[in-house]
Image (spheres, grey):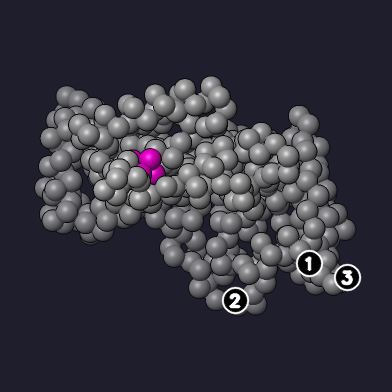
Amino acid sequence: MAIEILQTDDQYVLNHCTKFLARDNTDPRHNFGQLSDDDPRSRIAEPWRFPIIDSYSDGNDFVKSYSSNVVTFVYQQPGATPPKNVAVIGTFANLYEPIPLKPVNFVGEPTGYYALSIIVPKGQFHTYKFIVDGQAIIDPVNPQRTQLDNGQLWSRFFTQLCTEPLNFEDWEFDIVARLVDHILPFRTKEGENFLNRYYNFLGKQDKQVQYAYAYRLDESVGAANFIDNILAREENHHLIDYKICLGQISRILRQRNPYVEPKDVSKELYIDLYNEMATNKVNGWNYQQYQEPLFFLQLLRRHTFTGAFSHPKYGGNVGGTGWAYLSERYTDKSGKTLFDWRRAIEAPLGLNSDYRG
């Protein structure tokens, strides 16, 4: 598999990594329960930012460039003695062909960082390892790790617009999607009418290559997919909340209707459960296992609304659907929208020629 290496300067790498890696603290100040205190990542600010996933533009064809990301691997020298060779292997290239990282300097002096930038298509996830002086190791910074069928542990990353399940099992994703449907306005008659009109519009525009990655994930504009993505990265410390509470919700729904899978129970059962969670009093809830169902509901609501109305590159708001809904709903007396989102967003999704995503 051919891989395209992008030549980035040292300043680019330092701008993206020193804020998070260049700290001497030894206390686990960044551990929110997702790590053990003796894990080196517990002292690193926002380790989920690595490898760096950035927008890509070749400077010419912005529509074509929109389909790719720049992925920058950064290895930090752990001790005083620098390694002789640092490389990376992964599923984004020929797996057992190491690609060397180059030393990163600042005003001509070594920084202890090694970096490599490559171009990877959006919508993908990959596993990788560093090869340091001939020894294969997982990325000591990146929290994303996955165990393969052979039992080996590898580091993992995913590019923007990824729709592959990263954390949720199928039944968990189905329950999240049902809960999200209840939170967002797209299950109302008005909302469904809007979605049908807008997705049909996107389908026509897609043929003209104006709306890359405009696809219909679910009736709630991909918010469930967004939640799965952020639980793999910036909100990983809340993954345990979802795992525990989705298990409880599944059990309660089975108790209330043992003849139907939780994803298929009636809308009324989900409404009842939602309302009970809002009062923090859920019949059948195991409070010893998780004390605050209301806290989980508030967490889910925050993630849902963020996903529905944030930039589509984060996995939700598919094709700008959430923004288009706001644009249609909020207008002045003359009918002109008060939320002209396309003026602020990069092509091909929007009309802004300055912003590149």
Q: Nearer the viewer, mark 3 or mark 1?
A: 3
The tally of labels here is 3
Categorize mark 2 by other alpha carbons within 10 Å: few (<14), some (14-19), many (20+). Answer: few
**247 sits to left or right of 156:** left
- Give the residue type at disc 3: Gly
- Give the residue type at disc 1: Gly
Mark pair 3, 2: CA separation: 28 Å
Whether residue 350 appears in this view of the structure is yes
Q: Position of residue 311 (x, y in %)?
A: 47, 47
Q: Which mark is residue 108?
A: 3
Q: What residue does disc 2 label?
A: 26
Q: What residue does disc 1 label?
A: 112
- Give the residue type at disc 2: Thr
Q: Secondary structure at mark 2?
A: loop
Give the residues drawn in magenta, as a range: 322-327
Q: Position of residue 189 (x, y in %)?
A: 20, 31
Q: Position of residue 340 (x, y in %)?
A: 42, 47
Q: Main secondary structure of the magenta part?
A: helix
